[in-house]
Image (spheres, helix red, strand yellow):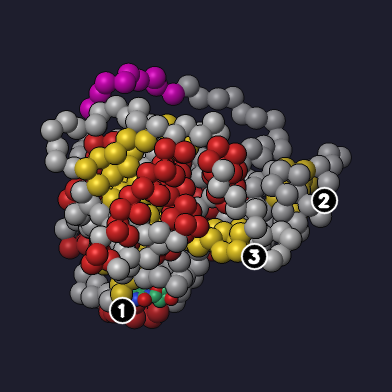
């Protein structure tokens, strides 16, 4: 008799192991490996002699596409993140921490689409119908024709959404609650989640309905996270934000039908999520331009410029190992900037604690922020405030040179629009617009930056009204 094959799957990263272990070799997480039945999920064979395959008709790249491929919500920040609306027949994964506002966003999207005459089905696996109705009332969506079901069984969901007129968009909230009769493992495991998601994607492809799948990011890995299905879906959006702040960012990390790196910015209010069309104004909101250690970074998120304040605090310490704490930026990148400052500019920070914070709880991913960070650090150490109307961008290399970054013109344009006449940018920047009336200073290397900051700050201090 054939032995029934079992395997051990990490619930965090999906790595398959031959035997159980406490720690996953793939991702280094502990207690995430669970015994799983190989026959159930994807890649699991039928366990019998395979039947002879059926040839499908091959087709060409050019051909009739049935109807307009995208459906717009009219919520421009959401449409921006999806690359211009949901694509018919595609599957989009919306991931994020529990409680960040995924269900709220999708309920608002469902209501907006329904008002535009689309047939929308919202399947909630986490909340009862009454709870979803309460939220809809709060969001002013209760009068729309969004169809609602509370169900978790994959076969039942498929039967429900397959009945009657084809839906334009189906929302499954969340994939971690899905379970199928065909997979033998417990709900929430990698096998169950993958089986459920695969069935939903198949439905989308077959019927042309757009499918939105909600996935919670899980820290412990006891439940399979959205990462294990990222490769199966057409687009992946992450909904991020800080619990302490009201705004949320919808970030595109994968998109087969549009650009990645786009963001949509929202603000959580008592009546749901509000669009933030000018994020720079939000992140620069309560700026105190007179204090040392603050530099405004002119960043880019996809095609959109975002201005955000970088704050540094450098303080002497008596501890043997000084503290380095970073919020909103990469801490190894900070160590690099500190090392370059020390090696090439003689700025000694070995006896100082260094704290770095990106205002408003925003997270910077671009290396172009190096110059702003270095400026904030030097400004704080010297106790000199930087000019209030100046932005900074540029990448710093280990040699201390300031390297050019992309989209110089857009960054400068946004800065000017928001009243920042000055800018410090890499000397080798191409595409610097000519004839503009901005006070733009090009920087060769880090020592150049340090001397300019010292120079401009001392000039500032000499003006009588500042004394
Ligand atoms: P929710 O959409 O349920 O999060 P998720 O689906 O990602 O788990 O939203 C959770 C939080 O949003 C909740 O803590 C309350 C808050 N919230 C508001 O502040 N205003 C609102 O109008 C709504 C509906 C929710
Ligand atoms: Mg939810």
Q: Is residue 395 magenta?
A: no
Horizontal placement of 165 versus 227: left or right?
A: left
Segment tinted magenta in the rendering: 56-65
Mark 3 closeness class: few <14, some 14–19, many ≥20 residues within 10 Å: some
Q: Which residue is mark 3?
A: 317
Q: Mark 1 or mark 2, which has the lower sequence index?
A: 2
Name the residue that disc number 2 marks. 20
Camera-near label (1 vs 3) is: 3
Q: Which of the marked residues, 1 or 3, is nearer the chain's N terminus?
A: 1
Position of residue 396 relative to residue 385, above or below, is above
Question: x%, y% of residue 438?
Answer: 18, 42
Question: Is ligand 1 closer than 8 angstroms to the Cβ of mark 3?
Answer: no
> In the picture, which quadrant includes the C terminus?
bottom left
Task: Please report the residue visible at 37 percent of the width from the left and 59 percent of the height from the top.
Answer: 385
Question: Do the residues under discs 1 and 3 have CB atoms within 8 angstroms?
Answer: no
Q: Choose between 56 and 341: the one closer to the eye.
A: 341
What x and y, as percent, mark residue 185?
68, 56
Percent x, y of residue 151:
47, 67
Tag nearer the camera, 1 or 2: 1
Q: Nearer the viewer, residue 208 or 243?
A: 243
Q: For mark 2, does the 10 Å Cα neighbourhood hold few (<14), some (14 to 19), or many (20 or more) residues?
A: some
Q: Is mark 1 within 8 Å of ligand 1?
A: yes
Q: On the picture, is 103 further left or further right than 119?
A: right
**For residue 287, above or below residue 24:** below
Q: From the image, tell me which residue sits under label 1.
A: 270
């Amino acid at each position: 008799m054939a032995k029934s094959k079992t395997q051990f799957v990490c619930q965090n990263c999906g790595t398959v192991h031959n035997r159980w272990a406490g720690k996953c070799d793939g991702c280094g997480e502990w207690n995430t490996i669970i015994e799983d039945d190989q026959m159930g999920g994807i890649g699991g064979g039928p366990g019998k002699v395979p039947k002879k395959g059926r040839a499908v008709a091959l087709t060409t790249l050019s051909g009739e596409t049935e109807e307009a491929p995208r459906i717009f919500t009219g919520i421009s920040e959401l449409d921006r993140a999806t690359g211009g609306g949901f694509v018919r027949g595609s599957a989009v994964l919306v991931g994020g921490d529990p409680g960040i506002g995924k269900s709220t966003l999708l309920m608002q999207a469902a209501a907006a689409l329904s008002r535009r005459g689309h047939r929308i089905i919202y399947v909630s696996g986490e909340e009862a119908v009454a709870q979803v109705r309460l939220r809809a009332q709060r969001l002013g969506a209760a009068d729309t024709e969004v169809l609602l079901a509370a169900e978790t069984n994959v076969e039942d969901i498929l039967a429900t959404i397959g009945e009657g007129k084809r839906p334009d968009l189906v929302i499954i909230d969340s994939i971690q609650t899905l379970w199928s009769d065909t997979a033998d493992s417990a709900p929430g495991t990698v096998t169950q989640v993958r089986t459920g998601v695969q069935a939903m994607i198949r439905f989308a492809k077959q019927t042309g309905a757009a499918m939105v799948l909600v996935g919670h990011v899980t820290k412990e890995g006891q439940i399979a996270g959205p990462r294990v299905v990222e490769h199966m879906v057409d687009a992946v959006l992450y909904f991020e934000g800080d619990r302490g702040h009201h705004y949320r960012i919808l970030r595109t990390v994968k998109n087969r039908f549009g650009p990645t790196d786009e963001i949509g910015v929202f603000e959580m209010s008592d009546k749901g999520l509000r669009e933030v069309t000018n994020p720079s104004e939000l992140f620069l909101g309560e700026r105190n331009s007179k204090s040392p250690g603050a530099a405004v970074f002119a960043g880019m998120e996809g095609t959109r410029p975002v201005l955000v304040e970088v704050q540094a605090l450098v303080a002497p310490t008596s501890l043997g190992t000084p503290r380095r704490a970073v919020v909103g930026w990469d801490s190894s990148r900070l160590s690099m900037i500190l090392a370059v400052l020390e090696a090439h500019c003689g700025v000694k920070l070995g006896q100082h604690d260094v704290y770095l914070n990106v205002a408003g709880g925003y997270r910077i991913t671009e290396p172009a922020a190096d110059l702003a960070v270095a400026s904030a650090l030097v400004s704080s150490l010297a106790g000199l405030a930087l000019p209030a109307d100046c932005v900074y961008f540029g990448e710093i290399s280990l040699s201390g040179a300031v390297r050019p970054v992309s989209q110089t013109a857009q960054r400068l344009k946004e800065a000017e629009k928001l009243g920042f006449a000055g800018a410090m940018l890499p000397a080798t920047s191409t595409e610097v617009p000519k004839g503009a009336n901005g006070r733009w200073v090009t920087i060769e290397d880090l020592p150049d930056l340090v001397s300019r900051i010292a120079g401009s700050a001392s000039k500032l201090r000499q003006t009588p009204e500042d004394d």
